[in-house]
Image (cartoon, grey):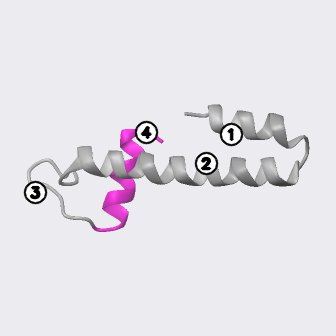
Amino acid sequence: MTKEDIMEMAKMAQLPHDFETGNPLWLDKLEFFARLAVGKEREECARICDERQFMDGERLSFKIRARV
């Protein structure tokens, strides 16, 4: 997820923004939160692959976890 993706989603969610630049307020905190949320979801997907050995789960979970 890029900074531009995060900024676009912030605009879509109508989060507070700087009236001069149009950038979301607290962008650094918002980026950090987005990365935490994505990491949590990625780990959950990898865990499911590990548990179910879904379609060669070990390799899939490794690929999911490696995607940073």
Asked if labels 3 and 1 touch by Cβ distance under 8 angstroms, the answer is no
Q: Which mark is nearer the camera, 4 or 3?
A: 4
Q: CA distance from mark 3 to mark 2?
A: 34 Å
Circle 3 — which element? loop
Amino acid type for the residue under numbered disc 4? Thr
Q: Earlier in the sequence, mark 1 or mark 4?
A: 4
Q: Which residue sits furthest bottom?
A: 14
Q: CA distance from mark 1 to mark 2?
A: 6 Å
Q: Is residue 62 magenta?
A: no
Residue, disc 4: 2
Residue 2: % across, % down: 43, 39
Q: Is residue 7 magenta?
A: yes
Q: Which residue sits furthest right?
A: 55
Q: Which residue sits furthest left?
A: 20
Q: Which mark is nearer the camera, 1 or 4?
A: 1
Query: On the rendered structure, is 52 left or right of 43?
Result: right
Depth order, front residue of 35/16: 35
Depth order, front residue of 3/51: 51
Amino acid type for the residue under numbered disc 3? Phe
Q: CA distance from mark 4 to mark 3?
A: 22 Å
Query: On the rendered structure, is 30 left or right of 56?
Result: left
Q: Which residues are magenta?
A: 1-14
Amino acid type for the residue under numbered disc 1? Ile
In the rendered image of this protein, does residue 67 appear above or below residue 38? above
Residue, disc 1: 64
The numbered dot on residue 42 is: 2
Residue 57: % across, % down: 84, 43
Depth order, front residue of 27/5: 27
Circle 4 — which element? loop
Q: CA distance from mark 1 to mark 4?
A: 18 Å
Q: CA distance from mark 4 to mark 2?
A: 16 Å
Task: Name which residue lies at 82% across and 34% down.
Answer: 59
